[in-house]
Amino acid sequence: MSSVAVAHELPHAGHPAPTSFWRKYIFSLDHKVIGKQYLFYALFMLVIGGLLATLVRYQLAWPGRPLAFMGKIAPEGMPGGQMLPEFYNSLFTMHATIMIFFAIMPILIGAFGNFVVPIQIGARDMAFPTLNMLSFWTAVPGAVLIIWSFFVTGGAAQGGWTSYAPLSAITPRGQTLWLLSLLVLGISSLLTAVNFITTIINMRAPGMTFFRLPLTVWALFITAILLLLALPVLSGAMIMLLFDRTLGTTFFLPKGLVVSGQPWTNAGGGQALLWQHLFWFFGHPEVYIMILPAMGITSEILPVFSRKPIFGYRAMAYSIMGIAGLGFIVWGHHMFQSGMNPYLGTTFMISTMVIAVPSAIKTFNWLGTLWGGSIKFTTPMLHALSFVSMFVIGGLSGIFMAATPVDIFIHDTYFIVGHIHYVLFGGSLFGAFAGMYYWYPKMFGRMMSERWGKIHWFITFVCFNLVFFPMHFLGMRGMQRRIYDYTQYAHLKGLQPMNQFMTISLFVLGIAQIILVFNFFLSMRRGKLAGNNPWQANTLEWQTTSPPPHENFKGSVPSVYRGPYEYSAPDHDADFWPQNEPPSGARPAGAHAH
Amino acid sequence: MTPRRSRTGLARIAAIVLAAAALPSAATALPFWMKLPEGVSTYSGRVDGLFRLILWITGIIFVVVEALLLVFLIRYRHREGRRPRYTHGSNRLEVIWTIVPAVICVVLALLSRATWADIKQHLPKDGVQIEITAEQFAWNVRYAGLDNRFDTADDVLSLNQLHFPVGQPVIVTLHSKDVIHSFFLPEFRVKQDAVPGLSTRIWFEGTRTGHWEIACAELCGLGHYRMKGFVTVETPEEFAKWLHEQAASAAPEAAPAAAPEATPAASPQEAKS
C-alpha cells in the first residue's frame, strides 16, 4: 500500500485550477471536463449514426421509393431522392463505423471511463492529464475525417465496417479517408488505454486494494488492456491496406485479379483472407471492448438500487478477465464460411462455446444480486435491468452462430444483424444510457427528470425490441445482410411487410430520443439539485460534491475501509456504508491519518 | 398521496392488460415467422435439426432467466420496513452455474462437430463436377460435361444458370475473379465464400427437382444485391439432355471462346498450388 500512498504525493498528480475559458473548457487537463467533452462528442455522433440507420431502414421498407428532400441533401447518392446501391452500401458501412468507433466506444470509455474512474479510485486526476487532453483532441480530427469522407468523389467508404479486402482495396477514395480516420482514432484510443492502466495501477487511494475496486473500474481496466493488445493489430492491417490502395503493395491482392474484365494493375502475391484474420483478431476483442464497460456499469447500478451487495464480487471480476482472455482465441468464428480450413472451424467453435460460460456467470450473478433485494425502479435501474434482459437474448443468439453447421445457413444473414444489435444496442447502449442517468447528477450537479426518463426508457425498450427482434426471423428466412434490394429474390419478396413494421418502429424509437435530448439539456438548468449522494451509494464519487471540485476531493484524498457494495450490512445502522467512512470508533488508519 | 397511488395502480392494471394481450398474440405469431425455408439437400435436415435443438435449449434458458428476473423484480420490489438479504454470494451456486453452461456448450460443440465435418471436410469421392467462378456481379458456371472431366471438348459454360441432377452428389469448385463473393443456396443450406486466389471445394446433393435461386451473401460492391443466379434441379436424364443441348448450341464458337474465359478461372488454382 505504501507505493499507492506515495503516488499521491507525486507532483504530477496535481495541476493548478485553470482560470481562462480555453484552458477550462476546451483544452482542459481535468479528467471530468474531458469526460464531458467525450460525452457530447459521442452523443453528437450517435445522432449521425442513428440518422444513417434510418435511411438504411427506409430503403429496406420501401425499396427504391424516392425521398424528395434527400435529393437536395445528398444529390450524388440519392439523385432525385432515389437511393443508389453504392450510397446504400456507404450508409450501412458508415452507420456501423460511426456507432462502434465514434459513439459506443467514446461514450463508455471516453466519457464514463474518464469521468468516473479517477474519482472512484480516489485519485485527483488521471496519471497523465496532458496525454488525456491529447487523446480527446486526437479523436476530434478522426471524427472530422470520417464526416469529410461523405463529401469526396465517389462518396464515403462502402465496403462494410469490416472492409474486407480485396473489395476495400478497389473501392473509391472514401475508403482511404475511412482508413486514415480510424488510424488517427486508434492513436487516441491507445493513449487512453495507457492512461487508464497506469492510473488504475498507481493512483488508487490508500486502502483501495484491487478487490475493493468498483466493478466499473475493473471492467474499464480490463477493457484498456484489451485495447492496448488488440488495436495495434487493426492499425497494422489498416496501414497495409492503405499501402495496397496508394503505394502499389499487394498484401491483400492475390495473383490474377481481374476487375470488370481488366487485369488489376498491382495484383499478385497477396492473401485476401489475411485481412480477415487480422481484422477479426482485433474485431472480436473489440466486441468485448464495447460490452465490458457496460457490464461494469450494470454491476455498479444493480446493487445500489437493490440495496444489497453484488452477488459474487470476485466471480464477477474473474469472469471479466476470463472473457478478455478467451476473447483473443475466438476470432475465427467470424470466418467459418470464409474458405479458412474447415478443420479450424471446429477449434474455433469450441473456444467460442467456452466463452459463453463467463457471460452466463455474470448473468446469474446479476440475478443473484436482485434476489432478496429491495428494488427501486429508478431510471438508471430500469436501463441496467434492460441491459441484463437484452444481453441474455444477444448472448443466447450467439450460440446459434457458434455452432458451425447452423452458421452455414445464418452467416451473413439478418440473424447476425439481430444478434449484434442485441449486444450493442440492447447491451452497450442501454448500459450507456444507464450510466448517463446514474452519473448525470454527479456530472452536472442536478437530477434529470425521473418521469421523462421513464417515458424515454419505456418507448426505447419496447421499440428496440420491435425493430431488432424480427431481424432473427428475416435471417431465418435467409435474407442476407447488406442488401440494397432483397425483393430481387423470390424467396425474400414476402418479407416486405415485416421490414416496414420494423422501419416504422425505428421511426418511433428515433423520435423518442428527442425526449432524452430535452431531458438532458433542460435538467442542467432546471433539474432538482442533486446534493452529494442522491442515490445513497457507497463508491467514492458520491462522497464528494456534485460536481466534484477541481482535483475531486476537498482536503486530502479519501482512505478506503471496505468494498464498494456494502449495502444493508447487519452490523451497520444505515443501509449504505460509504467506502471511506471509518469503522465506528476507529480512527482513520494509514499514512493519511490526520 | 392518494391520487398518486391510484395513478400507479392504473398504470399497473394497464401494464397487465397490455402484457395479457401482447403475449398470446406474439406467441401465435411466432410459428408463422420462425420458419426456415424448405430444406432440399441431403444434409439440410441435419442443419435444421441442430438449429431446432439450439432453439429449444436457448429458448428454455431464455424463458427461465427472464421469468426469474420478472419474479424477482415483483417479489423483491421496494417495500418500507423490509430489510434486504445481506449476502455476498455463494460458492456452491457459482460452481453450479459455471459447470452447467459449460457442459451444455461442450455437448453442443460435439454434436455440431460431426455434421460440420460431413458437410465441409469429407467430400464424396464421386460426384457431378461443376466449377463456379464468381465475378462482379455474376456466376460463371462451367460443367465438366458428360465425361465429368474438365478441360475436355464437352465442357459446357453458362452464365448464372446452375443445373444439376437430383439424387447425385455435386462437387463445386469455387473461384472468384475479383473480390470475395459468397455462394449461398438458402434451400440447400449451402454457403461458401468464393475468394480470389483460393480454390474451395464444396459438395451438396439435391433431394427433389425444382427451381431455386443462388444468392450472393458477401458484400461484393454496388451490384451485390442483384448478383443472383438460378438453380434447376432435374432428373439425371433431363440434366444430360440439357448438357447436350448446351454443348450443341454453343458448339460452333464455343471451343475458341471458352479458352480465354477459362484462363482467369484457372490461374487462382495455380496461385494456390
Image (spheres, coloured by chain):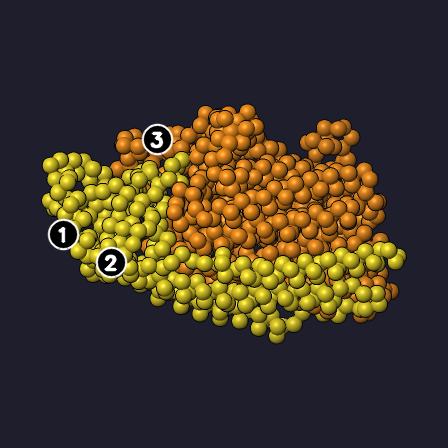
Instruction: Have a look at marks 2 and 1 and say if they share a chain.
Output: yes
Residue B175 visible in this rendered orientation of the protein: yes
Instruction: Have a look at marks 3 and 2 and say if they share a chain.
Output: no
Q: Which chain is yellow?
A: B
Q: Residue at x 53, y 65 (%)?
A: B59
Q: CA distance from mark 2 to mark 1?
A: 16 Å
- Name which residue type carries label 2: Val
Closer mark to the observer between disc 1 and disc 3: 1
Subunit ID for the residue under disc 1: B
Q: Quadrant of the N terminus of chain A?
A: bottom right
Q: CA distance from mark 3 to mark 2?
A: 47 Å
Q: Which chain is orange?
A: A
Q: Residue at x 17, y 56 (%)?
A: B237
Q: Residue at x 14, y 52 (%)?
A: B146
Q: Nearer the viewer, residue A404 or A490?
A: A490
Q: Which residue is mark 2?
A: B166
- Name which residue type carries label 3: Gly
| Residue A573 occupies quadrant | bottom right
Residue B20 numbered mark, or none: none
Q: Residue furthest right?
A: B1
Closer mark to the observer between disc 2 and disc 1: 2
Instruction: Have a look at marks 1 and 3 and say if they share a chain.
Output: no
Mark 2 surroundings: few (<14), some (14-19) or many (≥20) residues within 10 A: many
Q: Secondary structure at mark 2?
A: loop
Asked if B210 appears above or below A183 in the picture, the reply is below
